[in-house]
Structure formats: structure tokens, C-alpha cells
Image (cartoon, helix red, strand yellow):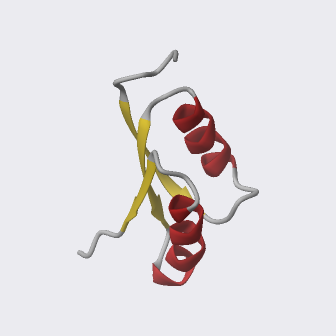
Amino acid sequence: MLMAGKKGLVLSITNEKSIGWAVAKAAAEAGAEVGIGAQNERMMKNVGELADANERVSAFTVDF
């Protein structure tokens, strides 16, 4: 796998059609572990569902 052992972070994912999700999914399929974040709590529900469907992807939120 091209990205085995690598870790990445993709932010501002909105849904399964976003460019950010395409990048995160491609990196995960290439072997990387990917952390993803959403723009806000409302969008985090969709992002969390995407992450749950892929074992190499983890969703998180940041509270300021």
C-alpha cells in the first residue's frame, strides 16, 4: 500500500460528495490512517457516519 504507516488530517468535510471526503477516502484506501473533521456540530453527524463506515478513518470535533 502506497501510504501504509502514514497519518493524515482532512478538515471541513461536509458530506460524501465533498472533495475533502474524496481525499480522505483515497488516502485511507491507500493505507493511511486519516482523521477527519466537520465545519460544525450539525455537519459532524454526516461526517461521523462516513467515518464509521471506514475502519481507517476517525472523526473528531474541536471545541474552542
Pick whichever, 45 or 18, lies toward us. 45
**In the image, residue 57 lies at what x, y percent?**
46, 50
Residue 21 x, y percent position in the rendering: 63, 50
Residue that extends furthest to the left in the rendered view of this protein: 64
Residue 5, quarter of picture? top left
Position above or below: 63 against 19: below
- Up the image or down, 23 lies above or below 1; here it is below
- Quadrant in the picture for residue 47: bottom right
In-image side of 56 versus 24 (left or right): left
Query: Which residue occupies 62% across, 65% down?
Result: 14
Q: How many marks?
A: 0
Where residue 29 appears, as percent x and y from the top left, is: 59, 33
Which residue appears at 36% of the width and 26% of the height? 6
Quadrant of the drawing holding the C terminus: bottom left
Left or right of residue 15, residue 32 in this image: left
Q: Residue at x 26, y 75 (%)?
A: 63
Residue pushed farthest top?
2
What residue do we see at 54% from left, 84% from top? 42
Q: Is residue 15 left or right of residue 17?
A: left
* Front-most of residues 54 and 19: 54
Image coordinates of residue 11 in percent, x first then y, are 47, 53
Q: Is residue 19 above or below residue 7?
A: below
Q: Is residue 6 left or right of residue 27?
A: left
Q: Name the residue at the bottom extreme.
A: 42
